[in-house]
Image: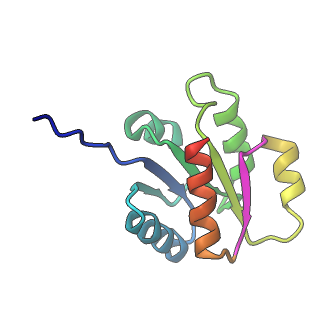
């Protein structure tokens, strides 16, 4: 008898706030996802090519880097444009600029509701 083992879905989380990064990692792992954490957007394409995420959660403000530009690069690269991106920010009124610059699959404001974030991740991974 052959047992079918489903591979865990993979989520790459990029945030320069170490506390938020760790909390989101714990939340997603508790939901059964395999998680890779990055505290900066540098070398994100290397992480994507080795980790092969099914979804990326990306902060807008990344200490010296603009998450919107990283998102734009991911969405404009043939090998990565299929990966859903959820952008996050604590800055008010930034959702419009995020949409204009990089067209993420979803935007979530910080502070976020844990159940809403989990629901958003599930929706994007089932699309």
Task: Answer above or below: position of 118 versus 56.
Answer: below
Q: Is residue 77 above or below residue 23?
A: above
**Residues in magenta?**
103-110
**Residue sitting at the far top:** 78
Q: Residue 110: x percent and y percent?
A: 70, 73
Q: Residue at x 84, y 59 (%)?
A: 95
On the image, the x and y values in percent for residue 118 come to 56, 64
Question: Is 56 situated left or right of 49 in this image?
Answer: right
**Does 33 sit left or right of 100 as displayed?**
left
Residue 109: within the magenta? yes
Q: Is residue 25 magenta?
A: no
Pick the front one: 119 or 70: 119
**Which residue is painted at 62% across and 52% down in the image?**
123
Q: Which residue is outermost to the left?
A: 1
| 72 vs 8, nearest the viewer | 8
Residue 39 lies left or right of residue 102; in this view the side is left
Residue 2 location in percent, x, y? 14, 34
Residue in the foreground of this view, choosing between 76 and 53: 53
- Coloured how? rainbow
Residue at 58% over, 37% down: 83
How many discs mark residues in the rendered view? 0
Quadrant into which the C terminus falls: top right
């Amino acid at each position: 008898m052959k047992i079918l083992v489903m591979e865990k879905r993979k989520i790459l989380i990029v945030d320069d706030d170490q506390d938020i990064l760790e909390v989101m990692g714990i939340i997603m792992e508790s939901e059964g996802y395999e998680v890779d954490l990055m505290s900066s957007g540098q070398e994100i394409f290397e992480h994507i090519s080795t980790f092969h995420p099914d979804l990326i959660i990306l902060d807008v403000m990344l200490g010296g880097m603009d998450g919107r530009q990283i998102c734009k690069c991911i969405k404009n690269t043939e090998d990565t444009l299929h990966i859903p991106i959820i952008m996050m920010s604590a800055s008010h009124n930034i959702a419009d600029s995020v949409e204009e610059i990089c067209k993420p699959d979803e935007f979530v404001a910080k502070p976020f509701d844990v159940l809403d974030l989990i629901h958003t991740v599930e929706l994007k991974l089932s699309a």
